[in-house]
Image (cartoon, grey):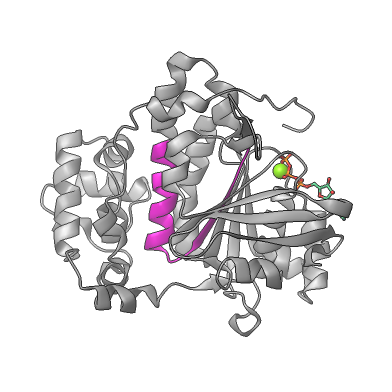
Amino acid sequence: MRGMPKKKVEDTHEEEVPEGSGEVPADLLESVEEVFVEGGEGVDLTVLEGVGPTTAKKLTDAGFLTLESIALSSPVELSVASGVPESTAKKIIAAARKRLKIDVMTALEYYQQRKSVQRITTGSRGLDDLLGGGLETQAITEIYGPYGSGKTQLCHQIAVTVQLPPERGGLGKGAFYIDTEGTFRPERIVQIAERFGLDPESALKNILVARAYTSDHQMVVTEKAEPYLAGRNVGLVIVDSLISHFRGEYTGRETLAERQQKLNRYIHRLLRYAMAYNLAVLVTNQVVSEVGFVWGDPTKPAGGHVIGHGVTARLYIKRGKAGRRVIKLVKSPYLPEDQVEVAITEGGVVDV
Ligand SMILES: Nc1ncnc2c1ncn2[C@@H]1O[C@H](COP(=O)(O)OP(=O)(O)OP(=O)(O)O)[C@@H](O)[C@H]1O
Ligand SMILES: [Mg+2]
């Protein structure tokens, strides 16, 4: 919420917390191409062993419309959504995976499959270079930093640049914006759209905005987003911010494990969306002060290992000299750590 003091809770002990179920197995993440090819839309789910018409309806009502969305989910998630016992959910997932022939692949096949990854320009040449060409689909990119550093500005900007045609670095698709802090401003979209020469009204129409008032609400809103992803041609899902409700609601040490499990389930869902719909996910995160800090930067991202492992790439943004912002790539599966300077103007984030 605007105006509420940001709590700087010391949660450096999060790493000791067992992270529970819901991890996406690495082998699954490496088989997107097959998933896309064979998954298809509106599949009859009763082809799966253990799924009768009733369960099929529950699954589709819960947003599991395709084989790939089931194959990429966890037993807990499926069980909660559809009401079937976890053991049955496990069998249904196994059946979906088998049908999709998700299996071992050679590095060459994996390389081929990576070619379906698309990139979205951030609107800053420097930041695009830092990210190896822009924001990747089939991945979660996190940007963390202190208040007022420009995280929300960047979210607004990429909600616009994703709409640019491919020859200008976009995907020609829309964005789904989950706003947990009430800081989404359509006026900013208008200004940024004008900078990029897009019609402001169409730019606004291509962004679906959902406000989330609590962490539970955030989970529900994100679940309900699924039918829109394919239906409304969404190329980017934004969660600004990923963690504020979780941090605000789960304050005691005794609730940390529960919080982390919930966060883990949440990130897992975002990752499934990214893979199943070949879209980019951009999340913002806050910083916490480091206990026993001696030198260097006294802050680190909130959320502990659950977020650290769950996201694909991680950016750190902070204020630099003369009102500029320094953006640092602190985690990437294949790019070197580096940093870039940008500025925030009326037209959005620009190179300096
Ligand atoms: N129209 C504008 N022109 C220039 N700069 C702007 C404009 N709008 C916002 N800014 C800059 O962006 C800053 C706010 O950044 P932003 O809201 O993205 O921060 P944040 O990282 O999301 O912070 P929080 O953690 O509080 O959500 C302002 O302090 C200002 O410096
Ligand atoms: Mg913000």
- On the rendered structure, is 238 left or right of 154? left
Residue at the location (79% across, 29% down)?
A: 3
**In the image, residue 281 lies in the stretch drawn in magenta:** yes
Residue 208 position, x and y percent, is 62, 56
Residue at the location (29% across, 72% down)?
A: 110
Q: Nearer the viewer, residue 130 or 19?
A: 130
- On the rendered structure, is 33 left or right of 191? left
Q: Note whether 288 is above or below 74 in the view shown.
A: above
Residue 122 position, x and y percent, is 66, 67
The answer to whether one can see residue 215 in this image is yes
Q: Nearer the viewer, residue 33 or 125?
A: 125
Q: Quadrant of the C terminus?
A: bottom right
Residue at the location (38% across, 26% down)?
A: 16
Image quarter for residue 29?
bottom left
The answer to whether one can see residue 121 in this image is no
In the rendered structure, which segment of residues is drawn in magenta?
Answer: 264-286
Residue at the location (42% across, 64% down)?
A: 277
Residue 326 position, x and y percent, is 73, 55
Residue 64 position, x and y percent, is 33, 52
- On the rendered structure, is 149 left or right of 9? right
Image mark count:
0
Q: Quadrant of the N terminus?
A: top right
Q: Note whether 25 is above or below 32 in the view shown.
A: above
Image quarter for residue 343?
bottom right
Furthest residue toward left:
49
**In the image, residue 233 lies in the stretch drawn in magenta:** no
Furthest residue toward front:
295
